[in-house]
Amino acid sequence: MSTTTTYEIASDVFRLSIYVPEFDMQFNHFLVRDEEPLLFHAGLKGMFPALREAVAKIIDPEKLRHIAWSHFESDEIGALNHWLQVAPQAQPVCTLVGKLVSVDDFSLRPARGMTPEDVLTTGKYRYRFYRSPHIPHGWDAGVLFEETRKTLFCSDLFHHFGNVEPVTTSDLIGPTRKAMQQLEQGPLAGYMPYTRQTEGVLRSLADLKPETLAVMHGSSYRGKCDGLLIGLAGVIKETFDR
Ligand SMILES: [Fe+2]
Ligand SMILES: [Fe+2]
């Protein structure tokens, strides 16, 4: 679990990927280089030494200022306190629900709980956090959008299996559908609900017109992302609306 593959998927956005053969799955973490560097996905505690080493090849890990993620699960947030110890000025960044419900009790330092009205500026880049309750899962779920380069950090959305290429410009819908159907056959079935809100949330993310999707498990995507986000709503309905 210790080899990290680093690839710059968009300007200043580095994808730090660790492939776990037992799950046939990549765990991807995204470091954005800026005056105030930001890491999206703190990662599992077990991955922390490898990730710290990978981050150190790009920036001084002590200079990290923002550690962000989508929802409270170990692959998103497990090593948060490790990062907070390494980087004395770093602050956790998540949805307001995440902060209020779980994070401030778990974290060594209080989180910045964001609503879509809040803007986080890190130098060249500016971010907003959009709530996406129960998409992919978790009441506290959200996605982070970097507005100047139109990068959507979308967590488990579009997850797919395999030790795949860092970034693709071809369709992500096919691999995502296959992965969802595969997961539904095993012990992790039901990991994503379909609700009356699902399509509306994904349509509002499509309205942001992202140009890069930073995907947690599998290849990231470059290109027009709005059609993919609307297509994803259809795949979630087809898989989980039973
Ligand atoms: Fe998750
Ligand atoms: Fe995940």
Image (tube, rainbow, N blue to C red):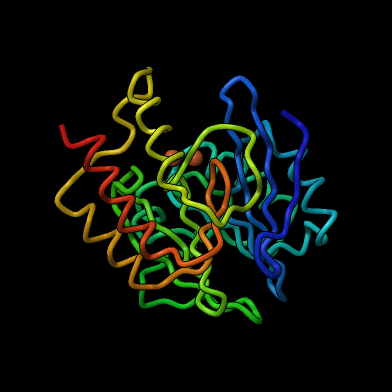
Q: Residue at x 61, y 36 (%)?
A: 26
Where is residue 106 drawn, in percent x and y?
49, 44
Q: Residue at x 34, y 56 (%)?
A: 97
Of the 4 image quadrants, the one containing the C terminus is top left
Where is residue 240 drawn, in percent x and y?
23, 35
Left/right of residue 50 with respect to residue 142 in the rendered view: right
Relative vertical location of residue 196 with respect to residue 160 in this rendering, above or below: below
Where is residue 168 drawn, in percent x and y?
59, 53
Of the 4 image quadrants, the one containing the N terminus is top right
**Farthest residue, direction front:** 170
Left/right of residue 58 with respect to residue 232 in the rendered view: right
Question: What is the count of numbered marks?
Answer: 0
Comparing 122 with 97, the one in front is 122
Where is residue 235 drawn, in percent x and y?
29, 43
Comparing 230 with 171, the one in front is 171
**Farthest residue, direction right:** 57
Q: Residue at x 73, y 44 (%)?
A: 51
Q: Residue at x 76, y 40 (%)?
A: 4
Comparing 205 with 161, the one in front is 161
Question: Which quadrant of the picture is home to ligand 1?
Answer: top left
Relative vertical location of residue 15 with respect to residue 34 in this rendering, above or below: above
